[in-house]
Amino acid sequence: SYELIQPPSVSVSPGQTASITCSGDKLGNKYACWYQQKPGQSPVLIIYRDNVRPSGIPERFAGSNSGNTATLTISGTQAMDEADYYCQAWDSITVVFGGGTKLTVL
Amino acid sequence: QVQLVESGGGLVNPGGSLRLSCAASGFTFSDYQMTWIRQAPGKGLEWVSYIRSSGSTMHYTDSVKDRFTISRDNAKNSLYLQMNSLRAEDTAVYYCARVISGSYSKYYYYYMDVWGKGTTVTVSS
């Protein structure tokens, strides 16, 4: 079965750029999306079709996807961005999530 | 506004059954594929099942096949998940979500743009 691998944790200083990767076999031949989940809340879609931001998502969130890796980049990271982030893709007839990355802003 | 509200969770003994419901409002429910996603305590997101807009096609993750059944009633704007033979490892928050899918520039996209707040299922004796 298809797997998406994310680093368990990423740390970033306020105002700096955070990058969260998502790796999967030939992931660049699929569309990736990203969700943000804060403690006690439901996931929120922040990037779809590799690099498209839904309405209301700040411009500091950006996505890319090439080769075997999709990347979520958060520019000018703010304290409010501290959360768990999940990548997701479609494979054959199944929905696949990455294991999630906890972003710490310190 | 677009909203999904889950219900039906609770505490159940191993081997027992539960039926989850998801009430949709604010959009034309019958136009959308729907899905159930779960999250075990302290763990990541796990896709459980999806159902096409007409209800004609369903798929399940391997661990719930032959135990869970997804269904929908488009007249009632409702999504369901019948869960039988429940196991401790089914303990999780269960979210229903609206699916956006299609083909664009050679590839197929699939993502969930609206999520409910979830309902908690605890399987324990």
Image (cartoon, rainbow, N blue to C red):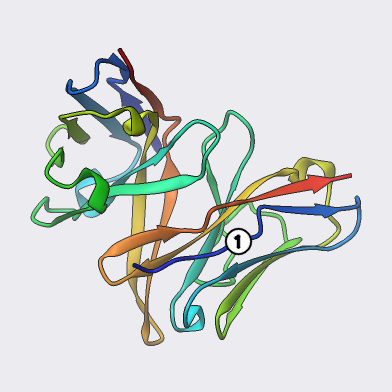
Tag 1's secondary structure? loop
The chain containing the residue under callout 1 comes to: A
Residue under pointer 1 = A6
Q: Is residue A5 left or right of residue B39?
A: right
In depth, the one of A85 and A68 nearer the eye is: A68
In depth, the one of A20 and A73 nearer the eye is: A20
Give the vertical position of B116 relative to A7 (above or below).
above
Q: Residue at x 28, y 30 (%)?
A: B23
Q: Is residue B31 left or right of residue B99?
A: left
Q: Position of residue A13 (x, y in %)?
A: 91, 52
Q: Which quadrant does the N terminus of chain A fall into?
A: bottom left
Q: Position of residue B121 (x, y in %)?
A: 35, 23
Q: Which quadrant does the C terminus of chain A fall into?
A: top right
- Residue A51, image quadrant: bottom right
Give the vertical position of A9 relative to B110 (above or below).
above
Q: Residue at x 53, y 43 (%)?
A: A43
Q: Is residue A42 left or right of residue A21?
A: left
Q: Position of residue A80 (x, y in %)?
A: 77, 41
In depth, the one of A86 and B41 nearer the eye is: B41
One can see residue A48 in this view = no
- Look at label 1 and name its amino acid: Gln
Q: Position of residue B108 (x, y in %)?
A: 35, 75
Give the vertical position of A86 relative to B26 (above or below).
below
Q: Residue at x 26, y 47 (%)?
A: B63
Q: Residue at x 51, y 63 (%)?
A: A33
One can see residue A5 in this view = yes
